[in-house]
Image (cartoon, rainbow, N blue to C red):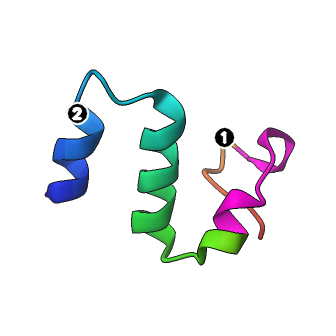
Amino acid sequence: MAVDRLIARREVHLREKTLWRMFFETSGRAEEILGVNIEDLDFAGRLCPV
C-alpha cells in the first residue's frame, strides 16, 4: 500500500516511480535494478533480465 501511495503522487517523476515499483515487485538489489538499461526491458512480457 505504501508503494502504491508513493507512485500515485503527481510530484514524483516517472523514473523514481519505476525504480520503486521494480524494487518492490522484484526484491532486486539496488546494483541490479540501477544497472538496467531501457533496451533490457521486455514490456510485452513484463520481464527484465538482471
**Placement of the C terminus among the 4 image quadrants:** bottom right
User: Image quarter for residue 29?
Assistant: bottom right
Q: Nearer the viewer, residue 45 or 40?
A: 40
Q: Secondary structure at mark 2?
A: helix
Residue 34 shown in magenta: yes
Magenta range:
32-42
Left or right of residue 2: residue 35 = right
Q: Quadrant of residue 30?
A: bottom right
Among the two numbered marks 1 and 2 on one chain, the one whose residue lies closer to the N terminus: 2
Screen quadrant of the N terminus: bottom left
Residue depicted at x 77% and y 66%: 49
Mark sitting on residue 22: none
- Left or right: 38, with 16 as reference point: right
Q: Is residue 20 above or below residue 10?
A: below
Distance from Cα at disc 1 to Cα at disc 2: 21 Å
Give, as a three-letter code, the residue at label 1.
Phe
- Residue labelled with disc 2: 8
As drawn, the label of residue 43 is 1
* Helix, strand or loop status at disc 1: loop
Residue 47 in magenta stretch: no
Q: Position of residue 47 (x, y in %)?
A: 67, 57
- Residue 33 location (% of width, % of height): 65, 63
Relative horizontal placement of residue 21, taking residue 2 as reference (left or right)? right
| Residue type pointed to by label 2 | Ala
